[in-house]
Amino acid sequence: MGFLDFATTKVEAAANWARKYSLFQYPFVTACCGMEFMSVAAPKYDIARFGAEFPRFSPRQADLLIIVGTITERQGPALRRIYEQMCEPKWVVAFGVCASTGGFYQNYSTMPGADQAIPVDVYIPGCPPRPEQVLDGLILLQERIQRGEGHNQIVIANEQAALAAKKKGIAYDVPAAAIRPRVEASKG
Amino acid sequence: MSTTDEIAETRRQIVLGFQDAEDLGAPDLPTEPVPLNMGPSHPAMHGTVRMVLEVEGERISSADIQIGYLHRCFEKESENATWTQIFPYTDRLNYISPMLNNVGYAMAVEQLLDIDKKIPERAQFIRVIVGEVSRISDHLTCLGASAMELGAFTVFLYALKAREWLFELLEEVCGARLTSTYCRIGGVAYDLPEGFDAKLRDILARTRVVLDDIGKLLERNRIFRDRMDGIGIITQADALAYGITGPVGRSTGLAYDVRKDHPYLVYDRFDFDVPVGSVGDNFDRYAVRVEEIQQSMRILDQALATIPAGPVMLPDPRVSLPPKSETYNSIEAMIAHFKLIMDGIHVPPGEVYSFTEAGNGELGFYIVSDGTGRPWKCRVRPPCFPATAVLGKVLPGLFIADVVPTFGMINMIGGECDR
Amino acid sequence: MAQIVLDRLAGQFRGGEILETGSQHGNEWARVRRDAWIAVATFLRDDPATKMEMFIDLTCVDRFSTEPRFDVVLHIYSVSLKHRVRLYGGCPENDPTIDSLCGVWEGANWFEREAYDLYGVRFKGHPDLRRILMYPEFVGHPLRKDYPKEKRQPLVRRSQTEQGE
């Protein structure tokens, strides 16, 4: 049992190491932050040296959704659909204050942060953030991926633990922090 | 032979190379229109727009352009902000040339205050200089991004390399690479830093080399020319009926440039040409933009040579903040500072429409003031709004693949089109 | 500068269609009676002394406490003669409609859709009057002075999803 745990943990660590250094990004570019995103991808602040080189313009082929720029209420369903189309494990980065909290836009059309629609792992503030800030945020995300603490990774881990417990016949109580109760909202 | 057999035989002949497909005329194949959705998130990094196309085969039969995915309520926010607080919102309109928007808005409010002729000369020169730097940055981004969408990734990297130098220069001037908020009502916020002149001249020399490289990669490139020549033609009549100005309007042959026809700031002192296209296709728009970068560099050379010394802000206590040394030391200055920040500048009641040449064309600010420190209405007349509208007329008849360069060369910026 | 435009308008329309004219901060303007909107626009486009071929802008101002409440504002320009004019067409609150200028300048199409979307002014004869900046499910006209700035009408929120996120 102990050895199996050790092997699984090592395999998981190796898998996370591979995942963090080969992120396939889906840049969901909407606004001004897109210009700084281009600068991050440009030769001077090269994001390719972190492994996150080429943008995959299809959610099916991407595992990192970078929300670049303001999300409006009109854009919400499109963002939700793209997130749901991505394969697991997946991570989300909110690039810029508009994607993090709505920025200085507080009005009838701006969604106050992309996390109103989808769970976000790393928030990068700035209007627009300097490319160095973006790279700092990327490194933060990579550390999270290595520890297995991305939102989606926690959900997967809990699902697997629940399945394993079911096989053994033990009751497994999903920690409340991982999966939020939705039953009340759907009945309302 | 039945029709199906004839078609099969025709295809076999074409595949085997015995006959040219065009010689035989189009076979009578049944088609049906298919709705195709492009957007609102798609790889062409031009802000967000959704195009609902109806295609028959590869040809578009109708196009419905749906914008509004970046509507950030510039007008409503302006009605709740003081006149100076609106500058950051104007930055985020055409966000690849923010200085031009700042200048346009500042000029509109100054016209309402009747101080537009009294702006210090150095401030006017600085506005022209940073405006033209922004324009170069705008055109470089447009060319780079559009070329990348056609597959020319190297051109994108070259253009961004040049843009990076301009961003660093703007950062030295105002502290921010992109969203500068540099102009103020009555002048500009800070003076140019030391060494700006030499640095800008150096950057212009290097940018000319970059432009040369880009030209060598693209202008005689068979693939680029095939995808751009004769595609997406906008007629001069359409440009007039829709109100399309700027590089897109000039590519149709319409020789209208606000800097030449209604000179503002100190543009009448500079010698520059306005490139005008003839056909109105994508390549014309590309060529007009490249030539405009060259002309902007010409203006910059002349401006740097003739910029006078002096103050950069009109010392009118109604609009400009008192110097910090006085604010901290005298009660009158502190109260003046307080009133200007909290109440805002008191602009007399009235309405004005002020227009300047932004990166995409005539950027108009229609401002209605009711005499308080906040506008009653602050409308932006976006230059790329009609250019995007005309796409609904230009796209039908083109291939799906033609949408990419056509949309790229229109340079629709979501922040400006949707506000 | 554009006084010629106002003079030609005064000369052509003598039946009270031009309610008021003026010149402020270098902009010439004329207030037009609602039913003469298309006639005045067509005249300005075609008359050889004014020749305003280029459509610039169409928007609306919510005056809120004065009547007519909605002022439809049109800016047009002449590229050949280099003059421009602003026209106001007032619409009262209980009947916010005015004729559409799509037949005079094609470009008015999207601008009128925007004025309808944000202010609720209906344009008679518009080929496709629907919302352009706001989504179809939005209720109300947000740029009116009585619409609160922060009143959101969200389409999607995390609490509504089925997955455990």
Image (cartoon, rainbow, N blue to C red):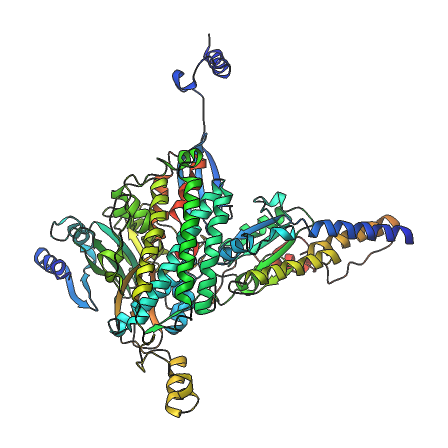
**Residue at position x 44%, y 66% in the image:** B180
Q: Is residue B270 above or below residue B144?
A: below
Quarter of the view holding residue C75: bottom left
Spot occupied by residue B97 in the image (x, y as percentages of width and height): 40, 58
Of residues C86 and B191, the one drawn nearer to the viewer in this rendering: B191
**Residue at position x 51%, y 62% in the image:** A128
Spot occupied by residue B321 in the image (x, y as percentages of width and height): 37, 81
Compared across the picture, whether B26 is left or right of C25 comes to right
Of all residues, the one furthest to the top in this rendering is B1
Residue A150 in sight from this viewpoint: no
Of residues B151 and B70, the one drawn nearer to the viewer in this rendering: B151
Quarter of the view holding residue B313: bottom left
**Residue at position x 49%, y 56% in the image:** A35
Of residues B60 and B172, the one drawn nearer to the viewer in this rendering: B172
Q: In the rendered picture of this protein, how many numbered marks are placed on residues? A: 0
Compared across the picture, whether B57 is left or right of B389 comes to right
Rendered-image quadrant of the C terminus of chain B: bottom left
Residue A5 in sight from this viewpoint: yes
Compared across the picture, whether A87 is left or right of C83 comes to right
Spot occupied by residue C31 in the image (x, y as percentages of width and height): 19, 63
Q: In this view, does B189 lie above or below B276?
A: below
Spot occupied by residue C158 in the image (x, y as percentages of width and height): 61, 58
Quarter of the view holding residue C25: bottom left
Compared across the picture, whether B278 is left or right of B59 comes to left
